[in-house]
Image (cartoon, coloured by chain):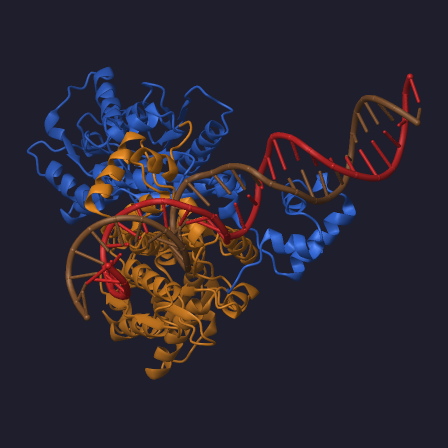
Chain colours: A blue, B orange, C red, D brown
Amino acid sequence: MGIMSTIRDVARIAEVSTATVSRVINSPEKVSRETRENVYQAMRLCHYTYNALARGFATRRSHSIGLIIPTITNPIFAESTRGIQDVADEYGYHVIIGNSDYQYKQEERLVAVLRERQVEGFMITTTDLRGKVISSLLHERFPLVLLYSTVRKGGISAVGVDNFKGGFRATEHLVSRGHRRIGMLAGKFSFSDRSYHRWYGYRNCLKKYGISYDPQLVVQSDYSLASGRNGAVRLMNLNNPPTAIFCANDYIALGAMEGARQMGLSLPDDLSIVGFDGIKIGSFITPNLTTILQPAYEMGKVGTQVLLNQIQQKIKKPVHILLETQLIERQSTTRPKASH
Amino acid sequence: MGIMSTIRDVARIAEVSTATVSRVINSPEKVSRETRENVYQAMRLCHYTYNALARGFATRRSHSIGLIIPTITNPIFAESTRGIQDVADEYGYHVIIGNSDYQYKQEERLVAVLRERQVEGFMITTTDLRGKVISSLLHERFPLVLLYSTVRKGGISAVGVDNFKGGFRATEHLVSRGHRRIGMLAGKFSFSDRSYHRWYGYRNCLKKYGISYDPQLVVQSDYSLASGRNGAVRLMNLNNPPTAIFCANDYIALGAMEGARQMGLSLPDDLSIVGFDGIKIGSFITPNLTTILQPAYEMGKVGTQVLLNQIQQKIKKPVHILLETQLIERQSTTRPKASH
DNA sequence: AATCAGAATGTAAACAGTTACATCAAGCAT
DNA sequence: ATGCTTGATGTAACTGTTTACATTCTGATT
């Protein structure tokens, strides 16, 4: 390491001004061929490396964006994060990740430290839409896009999937297989609008097909393998258990499968299961998981494009994008036993 | 957004010098109680936010570290990344992630751009140990720790697990269950020392128990679900197929399970499978995956502590840390059919 | 009364780039 | 010859902090 050489060293060696060196770096076409070559040569000579931090300081643009997610260890967020990183990278931006662990206090803290670090915008999968974090960023007109969200209120940009439609189609798929008694392992409504919309789609589908809604069949829990297992056990121990379960995400679904199996049920004959997310592993377990695919990587990409446009003020109006989900029919869903 | 207020604004309002404001921020005990209060008040008045970028520029410390991994979408890397982020966060550092996709060219490019961004050190899970990237960082004495690695040569710090021992124990477990014909789905040796060591443990274990090594039973492929599936199919189609397979990571193992099942084999009776990594999902599939647990989160934490110490020059000598793996016996391994 | 230590605060340069503006020479039209 | 345009380059101020050093003040010690 030791002392780094600067633009001034280069300038001295090439016998030009620092402005010229800067021009060679940022807009080489503005410099005559001869000087340009000299400058390049000088750079090599003193092992010059560009200091992007100093550039950021001088131009007051950090070329970084802040990303707040529940946790990078959930594959669905890892997937969208990858999309974000890929687009950011392409535009010369980098991403600083903060893990909130679904805790609003953390979210608040992370936004504060990332702002000190001068991120130019935020990409947030929020834990609490009504919290001050979002509204105050909004109020300052700080570039912001919500991911995995579908809010349309008050000038927030958001990109997400149509959770209502997804929940509806998952349920409809089960109905079309002949199920009438359909349970749901839902996420906690308090977390976000996602959980609620998926449930609402489920409920509406039941109504459409004249199936009465039984609150006993709905369990709210968090998005984890363990609570999927517990939830399934609870539902299948009812006097009149469901023949199929729609799970609010794939982790819950995998947990539910395991729970059902531990009770000695055979899948999918004794119980059909649909998930939500479309994580890769779903197609590698037995029976393969039928699920609603969320284009997570795509969502990350699109969201970042929106944010970057907003940062460059190419767009001023908030943007709402709903990506299409897709029903992936695999082996975890079949006709209910009775109607076999 | 608009114009941000600076330390000078605060100084003007509080009628002190900028040095004093700086002191209030960085070492409040050096400032009299009265002035301190005034300064805090002034900060509130003009909605001052600290500019960490400017601090980084002035002190020539970016308070950031670079992390290069194959891809954040692999849960094992997500897990260690989380460990890294948690420790970094604790020490006021942030992490910039680069995904190499197991491509050396990418790795090279990423190191270059992160250096421009003035990261203070690197955490790398490298694709090619012999590449110039590592050696030139080393040569410059640039802070660097290798993750998931166990090299001991030439002054590199590394933290990893004992892949040899892990491979040995996985194999020994199968032998102890009565298996004599044991296949291996190994990673590509060219990628890193990990793949090689796991295989070497496998081979040594066979030797110890007087089982001859059959190269037909070893397939090298990449660390993916799909190649696990293909590999298993290939092995089980041999004239004299194995009764057990040791897989170089859990993804390969899951893929192998799926492949075996597609061939109509029943698990674990027709085929025992051991994985390597200990990803969470392994305990939620049927049969539960027997595996060698790598403490990925822990590895991230420890590695970051080493790196941060190195950055602060608390340690000068390279450090080599080997964390213990752990055999998790679950249901995917049993006695071979013949000896039932 | 003179000296000194120590605490509190101020002064101003430094960090490594960018950029508005100025300068200069060459080429060209008048 | 004069003025005008254009392209290439230089000058120097600016970005928001930190920090070595200087200054001022207070109170204790001689």
Q: Which of the image's four quarters has the C terminus of chain B? A: bottom left
Residue A80 shows in this picture: yes
B49 or B104, which is in the foreground? B49
Which residue is depicted at the point 43% across and 32% down? A303
Q: Is residue B62 left or right of residue A246?
A: right
Q: Residue at x 49, y 28 (%)?
A: A309
Residue at the image position 66 percent from the left and 40 percent from the top:
A27
Which image quarter: residue B212? Answer: bottom left
Say which of D14 and B114 sits in front: D14
- In the rendered view, tell whether residue A271 sits above or below residue D6: below
Q: Quadrant of residue B122?
A: bottom left
In percent of the image, x 36 and y 67: which residue is there?
B159
Q: A54 and A277: which one is in front? A: A54
Q: Pinpoint residue A37: horizontal percent, then vertical percent.
A: 74, 51
Residue B18: horizontal and vertical position, in percent? 36, 43
Q: How many marks?
A: 0
In the rendered view of the protein, which quadrant contains the N terminus of chain B?
A: top left
**Could you say where residue A80 lies in the image, as x and y percent from the top left?**
39, 39
